[in-house]
Each structure stands twice: as structure tokens, then as C-alpha cells.
Amino acid sequence: MQDAIAVIDFGSQYTQLIVRRIRELGYFSRLYQPEELTETGKPAAVILSGGPRSTLDDDAPDIDFEYLRGLGVPILGVCYGMQLLNRKFGGEVAPGNTREYGPAKLYKKSDSPLFEGIAEESQIWMSHSDTCKMPETATILGENQDGIPVGLQWAEGCYGIQFHPEVSHSHEGTQILGNFLKLAVDPPEFKIDSFKDELIEKVKKEVAGRKVVCGVSGGVDSSVLAALLHEAKVNTRNIFVNNGLLRKNEVEDVIQIFESVGIDIEVVDASERFLTALAGETDPEKKRLIIGRMFVQVFFDAVGEDIGMLAQGTLYPDVIESATSGSMASTIKTHHNRVDRIMELKAEGRILEPLDSLFKDEVRELGRVLGLPEKVVGRHPFPGPGLAVRCPGEVTEEKLKIIQDADEIFINLLHEHGWYDKIWQAYAALIPTKTVGVKGDVRCYEYALSIRAVTSEDAMTAEWVHLPYELLGEISNRILNGVDGVNRVLYDISTKPPASIEWE
């Protein structure tokens, strides 16, 4: 069996989705930086990702083309990757008249294996500003609605596409990737149950007998992490920090969850410390940094400086959005588990993140394989910084109580009406603006509240959920009548991109 299918990261925010799609197709894939090409071993295939740069830039990211071709495996260039390959094969790249971003059409021009089974006309997703002037030796496989080549073949087994097959907006993108992978010889399979065994062996090797402190929250990621360490028989001290930014009754719920699976946890109440540290701060990035640093301080205060390793339920999207993996991707937001002190510990080899190559749905499946109950693995994601990212502006106890009360009503009604399990994530967020209203025939001046429900596969893109008007009306009515301090409820119908799932 060949080594992993290698995806070379040129900085696109969608790059990790290529890895995900390959795993969905049942094959194992890893992400590499361009300079790590020689460390890929003997990959079954190589995919060059898209990226924010232009190949025309003086310092444009490059690839060792001779080494790449010498591997003798199928190669696919996506967007930036296509433009780079086009230049390597003797073609040119020129600035386009306009930047192409969003949906477009793919029209097949060849019966290439890459487009086998694809409709003659198919929707694709564009995100680029340059166009390719191909060499005479290239074959056009497909064009867009303007007659511009968006699918090329330069040599046997070497293809390029000027669109993103990895996003759901490219309707037949996964099939195109599947067609490409059919060209690979003996590609490695990916199954979460066998991957569990690999993770356990990796954890044992990395821990090497040291004691591990694991931060748990009751969310999917940290619960699966704690179960994985338990399965690996690692000497673990599980600590749940009450940072005062949790959902209503969360402490009691978390204790019950871990008792039900036989995992011991310690609860540290640091809510006053967190709220004091956040007092007066309104900048979202600074709030995230404060929370991340405070988590580390609380952990060290609880266990002392002789901590062997700190385990975190960091997932792949956390790494990508924080742009701390060596990726050329830009930073979208700094996750609480990617603050400076954490990165210092990571450099010292004292951070354990066995889930950092997995996506949320893969973590859920891993949790099921580990025997966690559905009420744990099926929970909606909850942000590490807690309700602070659902409270734009200064975080106060008054605002937090409003969010907690409204969120409880919202989530309970989703359960009651059978919508909770159809949704990736749902929550209430406070809008830091007061509006005029009338309560009990008296003028009131209170906060506006946003409710949000989205569907997603991996949190990198998201669509808002079309909840029935009757349900939205009931949610609004219950919140307005049951939560003090709110006189207006809005439903957030923003997609990601351009909006993020959370408010901050």
C-alpha cells in the first residue's frame, strides 16, 4: 500500500476540505507544506491546493517540480495549483479582467477520466483572479460560461482545475476528486475504527509515561479526548474549569455526563477570575487571548508547574483558522487553544493534541467507536471561549444571564419540535445595542437578541437553517416573555462565508 495521499497546502482556507473529502471517499490523506514535498514518502497521489497568492508574485510559493514529476503518481492542481502547474508545463498565467468568486458553470469539453460521469453542464465554485494561457501540448477538459478553460490536462495523469471541487457549492466536486483518486495505485484506506488504534499508539508514544492533565468541558471534542486517553490507559487528571462563560446548568450537566461514562473529573470554579480579567475589554481577539491565557493559568494553579503534558481537544479547523500549522493561510481568529503560552508549551513538547488532524464529524464517529453515548457525541459544538464570543462588546454577568436564559429556551424548543438533531449548531447571542419597545404598556429600552441555527459538515462553511415561521414565532415569544432585558429577537440568516458561525 502506498503512503498517504499528499495534499500540498498553498494557503487556501478550503485546503483542509480536500483532505476531508478524500477521507469521505475512504482514503487516507495528509496535509503538507510545499517545502515538505520530499517528506511525503511515496504518496499514492498528489494534490496541489489553491491559495490567496498569485503565481506572478516575485515571492510566489513554489514547488520542486522535478521531484514532483519524479514520483510517478497522479497529480491534480486546484486553482493556484493549476496555475503553478500550467507555468511549469510551459504555459503562462495572466491577470484576469475581474476576480471570479462564487458559483459558475462547468461545461465538459472532453471525455477525460477526470470528468467521467459528470454532467455536460455542472455548477462549480470559483475563487481566483488570474487565468491560464495554456501551452500547445495541453488539452482543454472543460470551460466556464465565458469560454475560459477551467479544466486542463498537460500530461498523462497530470490535471488542473480552476475551481474548488472540495466545497459543497461545486455540486459534483466530490465525484471529480473520486475520479482523480481512481488513477492512484493502491491508495491507503481510511476507517475511523482502525484510526482509533493508530491514535492510541501515537498517544502512548508521545506521552511516554508522563502524567497528563486534560481540560474537559462536556463538549464533544474534550469528551472524546478524555475517552481516548482513558482507553489508552494514560495517567490522566481531567479538570473541568468553570470559567463563568458556560451554558445554563452546564456544570451539573458535565458532572453527570462524565459520571455516566466512568471518567473522573475535577471541577475548578474560576468564574470570578475570568470575568474580572475580561472586565472592560471589547476587542474580540483580545478577549480570546485573555480567555486562553487564563485557562493556562488556572490549570497551572490547579496542578502546579510540574505538569507533564496538557491535553487539548484541538480539531483541524481550529489549527487552520488560527493559521498556526505552518500554513500560508491567513488568520481568521485565534482559538483559545492557540494563544502564546499554549504555543510555548507546544514548542516544549508539553501539549498533547491527538485530535488535531480530525474534523468534527470524524471526532463524533471516534466517540461512538470509543463507546460514548449519543447525548455526548451528538451535542452541538460549543466554542472554547464560551459565551464570550456570543457577547460582542464587554462581557458582563447581566449579559451572560440573558444569553444563558435565551439559549436554554431556544435549544429546548428545538428538541421539543424535533429540529435539534437536524442542525449543526444553534445558539442565542446578545446584540450590544438597546432598542425601544413596549412591555406592560410601558416604554422599555432593552437589548436586541440574535438566534442562529446553521447546517455544516465541518464548520469551514455553513448555511442558515430554514426553520418554520411558526417555530421562530414561538421561540421569539418565549424569549420575549421569559427573559428579562430583551425586547427584540432577530434570526440570523448569514452564510459562512462571509460571516463566521459565531459572532466573534
Image (tube, rainbow, N blue to C red):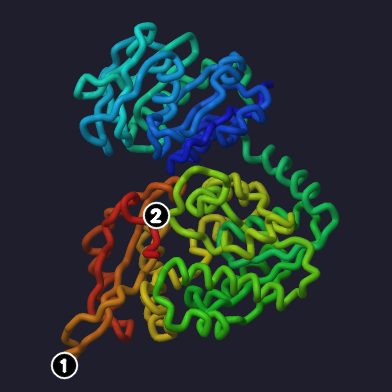
SS at circle 1: strand
Crowd tier of the residue under label 1, counting other residues whose Cα lies within 10 Å: few below 14, some 14–19, many 20 or above: few
Please state, as top left, top right, bottom left or bottom right, where the N terminus lies in the image.
Answer: top right
Inspect the image, locate mark 2, and give the three-letter code of the amino acid beneath it.
Ile
Q: Give the residue furthest to the top.
A: 137
Q: Give the residue furthest to the right.
A: 209
Crowd tier of the residue under label 2, counting other residues whose Cα lies within 10 Å: few below 14, some 14–19, many 20 or above: some
User: Foreground mark, 1 or 2?
Assistant: 1
Q: Does residue 423 lie above or below 8 as drawn?
A: below
* Rendering coords of residue 361 (x, y %): 52, 47
Residue that appears at 58% across and 77% down:
242
Can residue 227 be seen by looking at this rendering? Answer: no
Residue 454 position by quadrant: bottom left
Can residue 295 be seen by looking at this rendering? Answer: yes
Of residue 35 and residue 238, the one placed in the foreground of this image is 35
Q: Is residue 471 left or right of residue 48?
A: left
Q: Does residue 395 lie above or below 418 as drawn?
A: below
Q: Does residue 97 lie above or below 391 as drawn?
A: above
* Rendering coords of residue 471 (x, y %): 27, 64
Residue position for label 2: 423
Residue position for label 1: 442
Of residue 56 and residue 124, the one placed in the foreground of this image is 56
Residue that appears at 75% across and 49% down:
203
